[in-house]
Amino acid sequence: MEPERHATADAPAGAAFDTDIPARLDRLPWSRFHWLLVIALGASWAIDGLEVTLKGAVSGVLQDPASLHLDAGEIGALASFYLIGAVTGALFFGWLTDRHGRSRLFFITLAVYLTGTLLTAFSWDFASLAAFRCLTGFGIGGEYAAINSAIDELIPARLRGRINLIINGSFWLGAMVGSGATVLLLDPAIFAVDTGWRVGFGIGATLGFVVLLARAFIPESPRWLSIRGRRIQAEQAMAAIEAKVQRQTGKVLEPATATLTIHPRHRFGLRIIFSTLFGRYRQRAFLCFVLIASQAFLYNAIFFTYALVLTRFYDVPAQNTGLYLLPFAIGNFLGPLLMGHYFDSLGRRAMISGTYAMAATLLLATGAAFVAGTLSATGQTAAWAVIFFFASAAASSAYLTISEVFPLELRALAIAVFYSLGTAAGGIVAPWLFGLLIGSGDRLNVFWGYALGAGLMYVAALVELRYGVRAEQASLEAVAAPLSAEKS
């Protein structure tokens, strides 16, 4: 059966018009169309997870004189260069995503990211590796803005929380593959010390180009088209989605009754942008900054330097560190997968604050056991798997929060701004700091780094309890009205 018809004539430039597209998107039943979105968007994070895990696992090999012969400080600095690129890329591409649409930027950001990954395989010294890691980060920063915007605008409101967490958590599926692959790639009996890690980055880039093909099936956001005044395109995109869903599910779609009046505005000056993000929504801005900064410190401190902990304190051979990253990745993936639906049922505030606090508590306990010397490499890894079962859901919920609590016109830019501010404040210095702490060889020094991470996570839990937004099962427009819904 054909979906209900809607007028498609554009209003004169600048003239107001009514649209029911948000309500039509939110009332759609789950279908293969939605699964395609999950797979196409999640695959990008999986490729990123493979590549970043590979970088973490090869930290020991990169210190080998037969390879690039880097020291612990340089290993930590490489992660910082990656994050610098991600911060700048998020801001640049986030601005472009709001101006030119979600689907167009999908291809550009992924292409930049994959180019950086491929070039990484041909690095010849610390400077070249740092430059290519920065370029890789530049592309992935843009991915954060484009992908999270598309998730929220295309997924029905009743499922938005769990699907957002699962897609962001799919990073760890790639991490599982990457950690397992390093067992072969870093085996000197199979590849020379300076060859295996290069092959790994080359394979990751090659797989990533396949993901570009899947991106072609993702439509432009009808919500974005509407607020840009492209009424005909928005209606055509919406009708095509409805036709697919009806054909795939065999269900007759109920008419949507809620409408929104749009006053198209194609440009928003810096004054409007900053007054909206940091004036009207200043409490939400503070919340988003704290959530992102705290998880950025924890993740970048632990993940990028865990191979150093294994080799320095547990005498794990560098080529075997990938085996220990595998259960770590499994815990990270299972957290969002198994707890995601509670973010839609129990609610954002309870689940976000709870996962941040639980991760912090377990981190302190693990740090104390590390100092006491009661953990083996296996025990340390098991502890990380449990900690990041909760921390992964917390981190994904930070991106969920940013992507749904600001007006649609600024969504991608808001994701970029708070990702950049939070990562700059909490993430860029973390790998370098932990590289120095681990390099000291003193377990107590490393513990104080863990304690700092736990303290930041506790602060985030308290801020969420105070300023958290009840966005569960609510339409995006109800959580934050579009600026275009207001008269100029």
Image: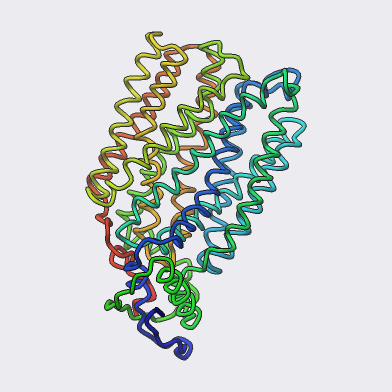
Q: Is residue 488 visible?
A: no
Q: Where, by quadrant of the figure, is residue 330 drawn? A: top left
Foreground pick, 188 / 16: 188
Q: Where, by quadrant of the figure, is residue 333 drawn? A: top left
Relative vertical location of residue 257 with respect to residue 207 in this rendering, above or below = below
Name the side, left or right, on which 142 lies relative to 426: right
Relative vertical location of residue 207 with respect to residue 60 in this rendering, above or below = below
Q: Residue at x 76, y 19 (%)?
A: 66
Q: Quadrant of the C terminus?
A: bottom left
Q: How many marks?
A: 0
Foreground pick, 59 / 160: 160
Q: Is residue 183 visible?
A: yes
Residue 240 x %, y %: 48, 74
Residue 285 x %, y %: 36, 53
Q: Where, by quadrant of the figure, is residue 185 drawn? A: top right
Foreground pick, 141 / 5: 5
Relative vertical location of residue 69 with respect to residue 169 in this rendering, above or below = above
Residue 253 x %, y %: 33, 74
Name the side, left or right, on which 202 lies relative to 17: right
Foreground pick, 278 / 215: 215
Q: Quadrant of the N terminus?
A: bottom left
Relative vertical location of residue 232 with respect to residue 415 in this rendering, above or below = below
The figure's colour scheme reads rainbow
Q: Residue at x 57, y 38 (%)?
A: 50
Q: Residue at x 59, y 19 (%)?
A: 320
Q: Residue at x 39, y 30 (%)?
A: 453
Residue 175 x %, y %: 53, 35
